[in-house]
Image (tube, rainbow, N blue to C red):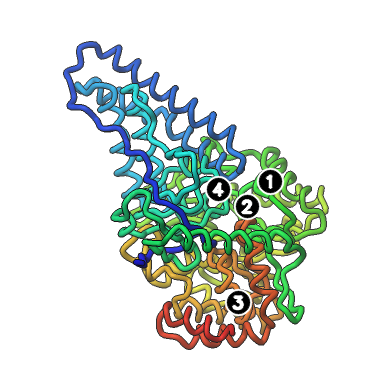
Amino acid sequence: MRELSGIGVSPGRAAGPVLRLAPPPSLPSPSAVADAAAEHAAVRRAVAVVAADLTRRADAAADPTAAEVLRAQVLMATDEMLTSAADDAVDGGLPAPHALAAALAEHRAAFEAAGGYLAERISDLDDLRDRLIAACLGVPMPGVPSPGHPYILVARDLAPADTAGLDPAVVLGLVTAEGGPTSHTAILARTLGIPAVVRCADVLEVPDLSVVAVDGATGVVTAGLTDAEAADVNDAAAEARARRAQSHGPGRTADGHPVALLANIGSARDLIGDVEGVGLFRTELLYLDHTDPPGEREQIAAYTAVFEALPGRKVVVRTLDAGADKPLPFLRLADEPNPALGVRGLRVARRAPEVLDTQLAAIAAAAAATEADVWVMAPMVATAGEAAGFAAACRAHGLRTAGVMIEIPAAALRAPSILRDVDFLSLGTNDLSQYTFAADRMCGDLADLLDPWQPALIALIAACAAAGAEAGKPVGVCGESAADPGFALVLTGLGISSLSMAPRSIPAVREALAAHTLEDCRRIAKAALAADTPEAARAAAQSSSH
């Protein structure tokens, strides 16, 4: 057997034969344009065909997150700027398939230059290009194989339209050579509950129908299994799923120490199962398809839908997390050389204070009309002064519980000062890793620096937890690291009071906590904190857990 290494992005284990994603269509050599009007019409037909297909997939998607991702792709496909760029390419002498490819190449270069959120959407654009070209050429759309038996899907990368339609009963596991922990592939795999590993370059060397095992927690892909060994892996995984399906109730350690297990959501449709509450309500999804800011009434309706579903339970609302790397037309923000370090999150209020004011008013109105325990937090807070200003704005609108996200090392280092004016902290470990290690979240070559088990990141988390304990105020984690059952033990041992994650990840974390006492967790956290490398931290934590 041979072990291949990648980044585990969706926990769980599965085994089966490898099958690859169907290749994208090939562009023929361009021919001279004899009838420009016909090529313009072909561009529009292709856009209509692809938009209709993606809309059908969105409507059929059982998972609301998958449906939202596909509808975002529809908006990309029908963007007038794309059609206009393709028309210009036709007028320049390119036939429709090549014109669409050229137009999307321009968009791709712009997304890549912008970095951050837009860079994470490059694979979405590539998929859109392949689908538009296929529609123009009249060939089948690229897609997922249907062999009639369960398998492990292997691809260089996956697009939302492919991932969203995956059936977990057929696609047992997912391994890609590219992608990252925050890509749509990773997000949707977690949402669907499919074990997944990304950034496993060597997997492309594994022949079709070879039997492999996928461990979505450790990122290890084991090639060369026998059918009997694969069956053992799947039997053990099925037993674990059945055990977790019986797991209910609040999160707590074996000796009864409470650790709230909350859900990360983008809308009311993401609420599945019985959750203790919501630790991260991403409100930017309400804004992303708007050319004008959503009005107060529209926002009230969206927030009310979530609050009404959780009477008496905590809902932590994150105010608009957008800006230079998640551009919204109505913000009219200038281009920036480094969007990740620019005007984003709470900083948008420096230039457009009315956007935050309207949002806080809408949250307050929805909270007043429902029985949810509504907390509000701001993203991208760097200083105690920013935290104090945000807390004052919340309280001016009648919102009683105001907090901030800790995503910037400066804020983590000054957590005691920040906690003087706010009621809680929530650590966004994805961005905190990015800024701590000066490593772009989408740079595969630096993926090891973004490992949540990095001791420097654990030390920052520990400092924030200690500040919370000293102030008597809660500190939670809403980054993807909270969904790792092993790391959840470390976080609990450090003093983190709540963990927020994709709803499907909650049972595994609940089970891990229930098997360890608080003293166990403290011992595990101490061992991880003393390590010098993420590998050593994992090993030390695992050794200490027995």
Residue 37, quarter of picture: top left
Q: Residue at x 36, y 29 (%)?
A: 132
Say which element carries label 2. Answer: strand
- Residue corresponding to mark 4: 168
Residue 377 visible? The answer is no
- Residue corresponding to mark 3: 489
Report, in whole angstroms, how far the alpha carbon at label 2 lies from the one at label 1.
Answer: 7 Å
- Residue corresponding to mark 2: 265
Q: Amino acid at mark 3?
A: Leu
- Residue closer to the observer: 540 or 42: 540
Of badges 4 and 3, nearer the viewer stands 4
Q: Amino acid at mark 4?
A: Pro
- Residue closer to the observer: 404 or 491: 491
Report, in whole angstroms, how far the alpha carbon at label 4 lies from the one at label 3.
Answer: 28 Å
Report, in whole angstroms, how far the alpha carbon at label 2 lies from the one at label 4.
Answer: 21 Å
Q: Earlier in the sequence, mark 1 or mark 3?
A: 1
Give the left or right position of residue 441, taking residue 346 as reference: left
Residue 62 locus on image (x, y percent): 62, 40
- Residue corresponding to mark 1: 268
